[in-house]
Image (spheres, rainbow, N blue to C red):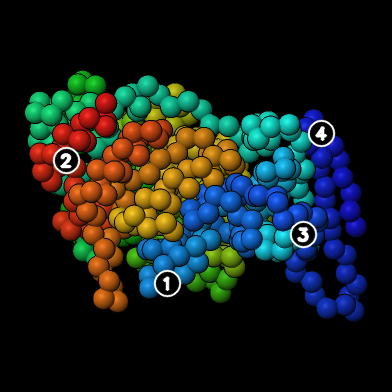
Amino acid sequence: MFDGNKTYGQLGFKARVQTLPEHEAVDRIVLIYQSNKHERFFGFGEQFSYFDLKGRRVPILVREPGPGRGISVTSDSWAVSYSPVPHYITSQLRSVYLENTEYSVFDLRNDSVVEVEVSALVLRGKLVYGSTPLELIRSFTTYAGRMSPLPPWLVGGAVVGMEGGREEVLNMYRLLTEDYDVPVTAFWLQDWVGARKVPWGVGLVWDWQWDNVLYPKFPKMVEWLRDRDVRVMTYVNPHLVPAHGYPGHSRDLFQESMDEGYVVRKGDGGIFLSYLNATMMDLSDPEARAWLKRVIMDEVLSTGVSGWMCDFGEALPLDAEIGSGLKVSGNEFHNVYPEEWAKVNLEAIEEWGLEEDVVFFTRSGFTRSPRYSKLFWLGDQLVTWEEHNGIKSAVVGMLSSGISGHSLTHGDIGGYMSIRRHGVEIRRSKELLLRWFELAAFTAVFRTHEGSRPTGNWQFYSDNGTLMHFARNAK
């Protein structure tokens, strides 16, 4: 069964499968329509390996790629994306997007047809009209949403990513501003929550309150830097680990969320444990959302910080048992989770009255994420020149995601992921970091990252020449 409706610049369509009880169960619908060998396809959200997707099979499922996307020795498919979008434009000024949130696949391998498969019994979408690529994007973003301009403080210089505690930060501030004339706009401090041992070395305590051992009098430090026109940004994600054993924390948010039943459960009813045995907040539950939003306000915004990395959002199981406050299944909610995660953060800063000043930046996303995210970043690039997940992929990722409405995005300068496995060792070189400075100077935000193995990577402070090049490109 097929029906359509037309709005300004767009024509809606809907197809549904109706089955009889005696027929075999059906769990998907396929739409096939005409193309030609000359038509090139662009968009599909954040795609890192190829800007033109003609000849490819593009899955639309929010996923964390893992280290080394597309490199056989480290990971799997080039097509894994933190922020895929069921939307494209073509060289022949045709554009389609789906309103479905379920898993879908766009198969562009046949020169003469496009095949769209959706894991649902109802397929909904729009054909978009326009006489230029910009008109097509403008029309699409009436549905997806449009991002707001960044505050002036964020785009005036370098966002310095570092770790180590209060004294390390203050010493770095003096070095950069007094000795190298670096326009420091902010310090981004992932380890504001404290450090813990993880399989590859040292990681973060996923319990969203400042660690008063590593950062004593943290709000005072934030205020001191703010008086010198330097902001502080931190880190948050929708997972929690137990806080007992960490003397710098006054609350155990993990236990609070468990006691209230705010966490995602597996299909068998057991607690879902994600990366590093952390629980995941059930954002389909209105009470869980309200609690997490209050945590962000009480524990993060109250310290005076001006933003944070809004990490993760990709891990919800397709068979998750969720609160269903939004009346959806895990299959329907998986791709929507990143949108809702961004929305929780946006609501927190709006209720705090700082929506024009505070910026959080997200890596996971879906169709309507531009409506809620303040800024995107490209996730965990390898510290290499490699095309699927190194510096080249950062360029392609920004271009492709821009087609689908991600107008404000950036990457970790120098990449993030170092690798030491299967006889392969990858470290950030000085030359790569210098060239990444130059790339980042032309992106929305100029932000450094020490990487997954800071001691093995070349850093902006590793020698005098690197510091000078860093200062030049930050201006």
Mark 1: secondary structure: loop
Total number of numbered labels?
A: 4
Q: Earlier in the sequence, mark 3 or mark 1?
A: 1
Which residue type does callout 3 highlight? Ser
For label 1, the residue is 72
For label 2, the residue is 466
> Which label lies toward us, 4 or 1?
1
Which residue type does callout 2 highlight? Thr
Residue 302 screen position, x and y as percent: 32, 32
For label 4, the residue is 7
* Any part of residue 95 in sight: yes
Residue 403 screen position, x and y as percent: 58, 40
Disc number at residue 342?
A: none
Answer few, some or many: residues within 10 Å of disc 1's Cα (few below 14, many 20 plus, some between 14 and 19): few
Work out how far the residue at label 2 is from the one at label 3, CA to CA, in angstroms: 51 Å
Q: Earlier in the sequence, mark 2 or mark 1?
A: 1
Cβ–Cβ under 8 Å for marks 2 and 1: no
Query: 287 and 107: which one is in front?
Result: 107
In the rendered view, would you say 107 is above or below 233?
below
Mark 2: secondary structure: helix
